[in-house]
Amino acid sequence: AYDALGVRVSERLIPLLLARIRSFATQYKQAPNASDLRRFLTQTRSTRVKVS
């Protein structure tokens, strides 16, 4: 989906984005649109994962 938007996604973000997309689809019973996908990417990129 991100390729169709002309957006490159790093390998490390793919599992996080897939989880976010699945959550959205389950909650709203529809696929995310282009605007949703861009928002998910922005949110995922700004999320810091703490590793202990």
Image (cartoon, rainbow, N blue to C red):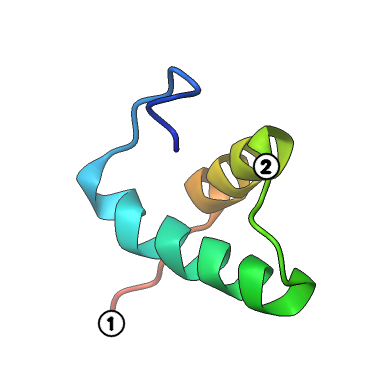
Which residue is farthest bottom? 52
Which residue is farthest left? 11
Residue under label 2 = 39
Q: Is residue 51 above or below residue 44?
A: below
SS class of the residue under badge 1? loop
The quarter of the picture where the N terminus appears is: top left
> Left of 13 or right of it: where is 2?
right
> Left of 49 or right of it: where is 11?
left
Residue drawn 53% across the image and 56% down it? 47
Q: Is residue 35 above or below residue 46?
A: above
Which residue is farthest top? 6
Residue drawn 50% across the image and 23% down it? 5
| Three-letter amino acid code at the position of disc 2 | Arg
Residue drawn 25% across the image and 52% down it? 12
Q: Quadrant of residue 30?
A: bottom right
Q: Position of residue 39 (x, y in %)?
A: 67, 42
Q: Which tag is nearer the camera, tag 2 or tag 1?
A: 2
Residue under label 1 = 52
Callout 2 touching callout 1 (CB < 8 Å): no
Between 32 and 50, the one nearer to me in the picture = 32
Mark 2 or mark 1: name the one nearer the start of the chain: 2
Badge 1, how many Cα within 10 Å: few under 14, some, many 20+? Answer: few
| Three-letter amino acid code at the position of disc 1 | Ser
